[in-house]
Image (tube, helix red, strand yellow):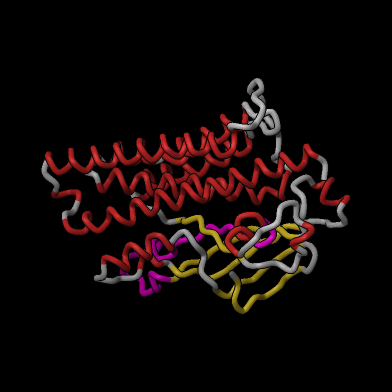
């Protein structure tokens, strides 16, 4: 592999890995805070309780955000030769599966930001406005750092996907006061030879982050939210559309072709379990359902692709 293509791939993969990491960190913070939130609802907080919660959220976020930037710079950029700020166009890479990943990550970071501010007693309008910006706030420094790296470069398409993820949260909150269309993620191991991938995964988790062939991104629609309240449609059953691609061993289409592969896109229609609409008195299960709501759980699915046409999967993940 040429040095340029190696560094380009490494830049794209490491940013995707960090994006998932920061998403789970923020969700974990919300997971722990909801225990107290269930004890004292935000709309019944006193002024002092609001101040305490808001100070805790601000302090925790600032400390975590600052620390993550320092660690990111030390781990990935310290030894990279500095250069003038520049851009790198990777819009055509990986059949845009990585862009779907940026959208998914920024969405859930912003979603968690809105919920966290609501828990802290911030007014609904401000919680939506400031919370929706969390995804952009977390993702933008990565692009800035890449822009100054000699072997990398900031990606406008990544920044655009991050922006769309944050805006999607804000739009739904303004329109419906809730999330009715939830981006989700699923992964399955693929038959493609891992030794042909540009970077190897040493375990299942690394393969989940590096192998775009096995990643599927979904938009899960809460059907019951669009029906009259008296409807008997099960609130826990969503419909989801998904997107993925396969036969990719290099980000660049030309490089992929040189290695003997012709990538193709995949489109899915599937049932989906809406964990957020499952009634439970358990605070622990509520928090578990919140975290797992970012994932599309195994379900029957219909796939369409240009290589095989229509394909039915009794259970797809």
What residue is shown at x 69% (from left), y 28% (from top)?
Answer: 150
Q: Quadrant of the C terminus?
A: bottom right
Q: Quadrant of residue 302?
A: bottom right
Could one spot residue 43 in this view of the protein? yes
Q: How many marks?
A: 0
What residue is shown at x 56% (from left), y 59% (from top)?
Answer: 218
Can you name the residue that lies furthest to the top here? Answer: 84
- The residue segment tinted magenta is 211-236
Q: Position of residue 147 (x, y in %)?
A: 62, 28
Establish if 167 lies above or below 100: above
Q: Nearer the viewer, residue 263 or 58?
A: 58
Q: Nearer the viewer, residue 69 or 224?
A: 69
Can you name the residue that lies furthest to the bottom here? Answer: 314
Q: Nearer the viewer, residue 44 or 76?
A: 76
Report if residue 142 lies within the magenta region. Answer: no
> Is 128 left, or right, of 81 in this rendering?
left
Q: Position of residue 229 (x, y in %)?
A: 31, 66
What residue is shown at x 77% (from left), y 64% (from top)?
Answer: 193
Q: Nearer the viewer, residue 96 or 12?
A: 12
> Is 144 left, or right, of 66 in this rendering?
right
Establish if 36 lies above or below 128: below
Q: Quadrant of residue 192?
A: bottom right
Report if residue 220 lies within the magenta region. Answer: yes
What residue is shown at x 22% (from left), y 54% (from top)?
Answer: 37
Could one spot residue 136 in this view of the protein? no
Q: Position of residue 277 (x, y in %)?
A: 36, 66
Q: Position of residue 3 (x, y in %)?
A: 79, 39
């Amino acid at each position: 592999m040429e040095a340029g293509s190696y560094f380009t791939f490494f830049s794209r993969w490491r940013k995707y890995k960090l994006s998932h990491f920061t998403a789970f960190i923020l969700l974990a913070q919300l997971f722990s805070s909801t225990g107290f939130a269930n004890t004292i609802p935000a709309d019944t907080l006193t002024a002092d309780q609001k101040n305490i919660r808001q100070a805790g959220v601000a302090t925790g976020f600032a400390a975590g955000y600052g620390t993550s930037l320092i660690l990111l710079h030390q781990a990935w950029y310290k030894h990279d030769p500095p250069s003038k700020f520049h851009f790198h166009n990777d819009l055509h890479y990986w059949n845009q599966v990585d862009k779907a990943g940026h959208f998914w990550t920024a969405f859930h970071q912003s979603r968690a930001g809105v919920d966290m501010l609501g828990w802290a007693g911030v007014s609904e309008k401000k919680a939506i406005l400031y919370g929706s910006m969390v995804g952009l706030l977390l993702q933008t420094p990565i692009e800035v750092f890449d822009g100054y790296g000699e072997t990398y470069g900031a990606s406008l398409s990544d920044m655009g996907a991050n922006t769309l993820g944050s805006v999607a949260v804000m739009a739904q909150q303004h329109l419906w006061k809730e999330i009715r269309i939830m981006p989700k993620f699923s992964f399955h191991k693929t038959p493609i030879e891992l030794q042909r991938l540009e970077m190897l995964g040493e375990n299942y988790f690394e393969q989940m982050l590096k192998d775009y062939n096995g990643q599927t991104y979904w938009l899960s629609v809460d059907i019951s939210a669009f029906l009259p309240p008296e409807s008997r449609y099960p609130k826990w059953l969503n419909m989801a559309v998904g997107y993925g691609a396969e036969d990719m061993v290099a980000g660049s289409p030309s490089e992929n072709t040189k290695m003997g592969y012709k990538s193709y896109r995949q489109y899915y229609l599937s049932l989906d379990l809406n964990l957020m609409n499952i009634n439970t008195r358990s605070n622990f299960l509520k928090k578990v359902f919140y975290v797992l709501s970012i994932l599309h759980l195994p379900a029957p699915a219909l796939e369409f692709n240009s290589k095989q046409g229509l394909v039915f999967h009794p259970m797809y993940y």
